[in-house]
Image (tube, rainbow, N blue to C red):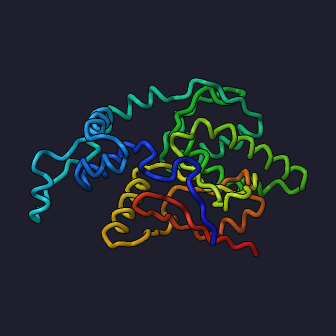
Amino acid sequence: MSGFNHSGPESLRNSAPSREELFALVWDRPAREVAHELGISDVALGKLCRRLQVPKPPRGYWARVASGKTPRKPPLPAYRTEIEERLRKQVKSKSQVPLSKLQLEFLRYALDELAGSGVDAKACDLAYDGIRSIPPELAAQILIVLQTRYEKWLADRTTASSMNGAFSSLSNLVGKLLPHAKEQLLIFRRKTDGRYSRADSPTISIRVTPDFLGRIAHLSRLARDNGLAYAAADMSALDHAWSVKQIYSPSAYSRAKTELCVSSHDVWIRADVDDT
């Protein structure tokens, strides 16, 4: 059983919460407790909520909760449309991504697969030699598909040389897309004892979706309310992938059992990989 930690700050206290996560926090407990957990003041928390258009509980809400009542909270989607449209315009990448002919082929495989599942793949603006622009959310979805379906796409490349070349091309494509998707992905790296770290050690990418953030909030609350060191849940329902850049035994990783583990302050992944 191996552990994987997020490559950025491991504590919610040291990271800026997403809009969905902030909404879950401020409706889960009083603002003073949320501000303390995030390491900011009550005033700063209020400003953050206004900037992200996150509604806060009205005056008297927590008193009613303490008395055993369950006041109704507003749905976040009612506040989401305007800010998502604004952010989409702000963060859409303007820089081109040059791609080889084979990389464009892999990219089109991924776009076709996403379009077949109902995703708006046309948001990826393609040129004859690469990508003109791509939204971070779509880049993240493409990366997940590339790294979970590439074995199928490489199956018809029978010779070792063509397979190795295709694998290298695909790995480079992943590397080119990662900077455009970094705002929408969490990367978890293998936990080490601090004495050494292998450069080819596998990583796990998770797309930051409302479902993923809601899962974290639920598990954190479950651990806190029951006095547990942490709570764990199977990751099969989450949009995630083992990184193709480090996987040299794909079949072993495709059978890996992965669990999302959440304590009151940390998030990590526990993985049981079959190396046989």
**Residue sitting at 75 percent across and 56 percent down?**
198
Is residue 160 or residue 74 the one in the foreground? 74
Instruction: Residue at 24% x, 47% y: name it.
Output: 31
Q: Extreme top residue here?
A: 94
**Displayed quadrant of residue 272:** bottom right
Question: What x and y, as percent, mark residue 262?
Answer: 45, 63
Seen in the picture, residue 242 relative to 85 is either above or below; the reply is below
| Quadrant in which the C terminus appears | bottom right
Q: Residue at x 72, y 57 (%)?
A: 201
Q: Position of residue 150 (x, y in %)?
A: 70, 53
Q: Residue at x 42, y 57 (%)?
A: 265
As drawn, the residue found furthest toward the bottom would be 276
Give the quadrant of the N terminus: bottom right
Residue 76 left/right relative to 267: left
- In this rendered view, identify the residue nearer to me: 36 or 166: 36
Q: Residue 141: x percent and y percent?
A: 55, 46
- In the displayed structure, does residue 232 sit left or right of residue 197? left
- 232 to the left or right of 164: left
Q: Position of residue 74 (x, y in %)?
A: 20, 48
Given residues 77 and 63, the one toward you in this image is: 63
Total numbered badges shown on the rendered structure: 0
